[in-house]
Image (cartoon, rainbow, N blue to C red):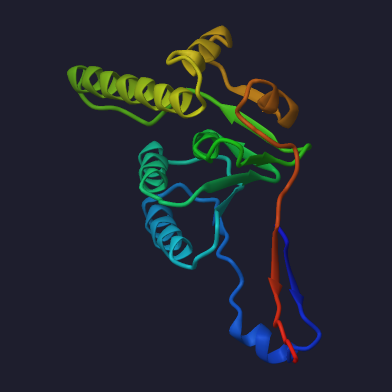
Amino acid sequence: MRTRLTIDPLLNREKIQEACEEPVVIRVNNFTEEGLRDFEKELNCAANTGQPVVPIMVDSFGGSVHSVLGMVAAIECCEIPVATICTTKCMSAGAVLFTFGDDGYRYMHPDATMMIHDAAWGTGGKIEDMKVDTKYLDDMNQRMFKKMAKHLNQKTDFILEMIKTKNHLDWFLTAKDAKKIGIANHLRVPGFDVTVSLDVQFG
């Protein structure tokens, strides 16, 4: 994602560039507890810069469902618009995070790929424990997909039904597919244009 800085020729370029901080852009690759902590710090920092939108670049094969839900909770508390941008891949937890960009602010490069599937984690131990774990995961899975559908202004079971039609296998979408069903809004990568100017008047 590019940031273009335009400076009025009347100003001292070096001093202005030193004084101006570029907008904060969050890059998400790891959906781990450490990744969640870093995400929360960066989101808070971005929200306090005065920039009009927080861009989140998603490039990931996925990770912890708990971590992505923590990131989603942080986004829901953000007071300025959040843009999600996928340049290459947003799969599994990455796809979940991508959908929580604000409406009109979800961008995919035309060659990017998205993949959505049921939540998964390893379980073991006694059979009764495995039953409890399976029920917990199923409940979380349904809540997550319903939350995604609601944010996309779709019917509650929109994602769940799409997963069902894919026989609960990995559901791959091209950027064009994602835009067609309303997950992506734009097939391009946006950028910031920062203009610094000084008005001088005489007379």
Q: Identify the image quadrant of the N terminus.
A: bottom right
Q: Position of residue 46 (x, y in %)?
A: 48, 62
Q: Position of residue 166 (x, y in %)?
A: 58, 11
The number of discs equals 0
Q: Closest to the observer: 198 or 22?
A: 198
In this rendering, is residue 40 above or below 89?
below
Q: Identify the image quadrant of the C terminus.
A: bottom right
Rendered image quadrant of residue 173: top right
Looking at the image, residue 124 sits to the left or right of residue 119; the answer is left
Rendered image quadrant of residue 194: bottom right
Instruction: Please identify the residue farthest to the right as the structure is shown.
Output: 9
Residue plotted at (33% across, 26% down): 140
Looking at the image, residue 187 sits to the left or right of residue 181; the answer is right
In this rendering, is residue 72 above or below 168?
below
Q: Closest to the observer: 149 or 123?
A: 149
Residue plotted at (60% across, 28% down): 183
